[in-house]
Image (cartoon, rainbow, N blue to C red):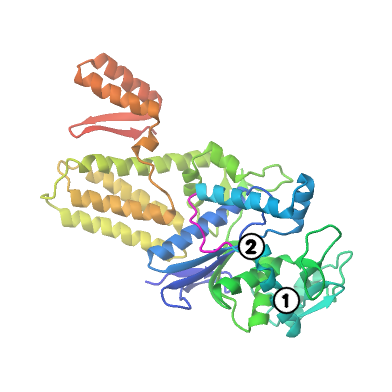
Amino acid sequence: MPIKVYNTLTRQKEDFKTLEEGKVRMYVCGPTVYNYIHIGNARPAIVFDAVRRYLEYKGYTVDYVLNFTDVDDKIIKKANELGEEVTDVANTFIDAYLEDVGALGVKKATHNPRVMEAMDDIIGFIAGLIDKGYAYAVDGDVYFKPRAFDDYGKLSHQSIDELRSGARIQVGEKKEDPLDFALWKSAKEDEIAWESPWGGGRPGWHIECSAMAKKYLGETIDIHAGGQDLTFPHHENEIAQSEAMNGETFANYWMHNGYINIENEKMSKSLGNFVLTRDIIKEHDPRVVRFFMLSVHYRNPINFTNELLNAAKHSLDRIETSYFNLEHRKQASMNLVDNIDEWLEKVDYFKGRFEAEMDDDFNTANAISVLFDLTKEANVYLQSEQTSTRVIEAFQDTISSILDVLGITLQGESGLLDTEIDALIEERTEARKSRDFARADEIRDMLKEKGIILEDTNQGVRWKRGE
């Protein structure tokens, strides 16, 4: 069964076919690095990382490019406020971004291009658009002419006349048409700048992605992804620039993730509900934040609350408890047990269900539901008087492979229990051996207060999180 991808360009699900067999060229728009990222920035980092992981699970090699906008009005303003160089501000927040998304389980990109390092490519791209008649220079600025590109508006599904009705020429702009947008901005006094055929200046926002996608992935790519807010004008302008310059389709599939709401309101600085990723992961396990983000389909909006995060924590705890209960039982299992094949078929059934959900536009929400059903079935199996090592390992392998696609690592029992609780369990075991049952019962009660439920079995002590 082929993977189906919802394509923003066509507004429908399409069979996924790559330009080159076994290889995916994927470009994801990264942040403008003038501050620490908020959870809205974290969502595309997480969901498209999961897309990448599933494609790799299916056997593809993924050439994954995520760019950094490291020169921009906001960065220049931040540098002036801090009294620092633009490059220093950019470096600080690039490092912070990589640290934050790394904590959230996001794999390193194949390439992380930066605008400052791609200036020759950007200038050459702009010069090519001028030569082809799609752009013009005026007093050190260069503008792109959307009216010269016949398909302008095809991604956002707007006509050029509709777009023009809302366009305005700002003070100081010298463009011929309100729709025209900047490819190159002439330098202001005491502002960072690069030399170009049109004078000192720096690139406009949209051109950088067109130039860097071409440099690292070629004229046509398989997937271009980013937040829903980038559909227009950023991605619309990328298409116009790239296809005008190259004469080829820019991207075959366009993927966009939905917005994040905070307590049912759209996140914004004006509402005072702006939440930084690093603040959240100080309060909550980053794995729980990621698990929560993937519990809703990537195209749908997601409501972010502490209550929902706590619910996600309990859900992840139950999955991990099931896995390590399997590990406990495995030590006393054997292979000469009836119904092994029947149980192995059940495990394969859940694996097939997981793949079917992910094949349907990377539906991580439904994939997580399959994971819950799989762990419930594993718990049923553990009620059997005799268990098979093969079956237990099949359950564990399938749980692990699903979690790996989701980018969730198993902490291990030492991670689930802090050192205090670990020591208490060990002390209780020794107390029971020495027949000090009063102390053993006291420790059991102490652990229960901490949310750890103990179960004494013939195979040793098993534990689980309290509900």
Name the foreground residue: 217 vs 363.
217
Q: Which residues are magenta?
A: 104-112
* Horizontal side of residue 370 vs 265, given as left or right: left
Secondary structure found at label 1: helix
The reply to whether dot 1 and dot 2 touch (C-beta < 8 Å) is: no
Residue sticking out furthest to the left: 336
> Which is nearer the N-term, disc 1 or disc 2?
2
- The answer to if 109 sits in the magenta stretch is yes
Classify the position of the N terminus by image quarter: bottom left
Residue beneath label 2, please? 114
Q: Residue at x 17, y 32 (%)?
A: 458
Name the foreground residue: 391 vs 423.
423
Instruction: Label the magenta part by its dominant secondary structure.
Output: loop
Q: Amino acid at mark 2?
A: Arg
Q: Quadrant of residue 451?
A: top left
Residue sticking out furthest to the right: 171
Looking at the picture, how far across and down is residue 56, in whole percent?
Answer: 41, 64
Classify the position of the C terminus by image quarter: top left
Question: How many numbered discs?
Answer: 2
Looking at the picture, how far across and down is residue 135, in whole percent?
Answer: 77, 79
Residue beneath label 1, please? 126
Looking at the picture, how far across and down is residue 57, in whole percent?
Answer: 38, 63
Q: Residues within 10 Å of mark 2 (few under 14, many from 20)?
A: many
Query: Relative to 317, does residue 198 appear above or below in the rendering?
Result: below
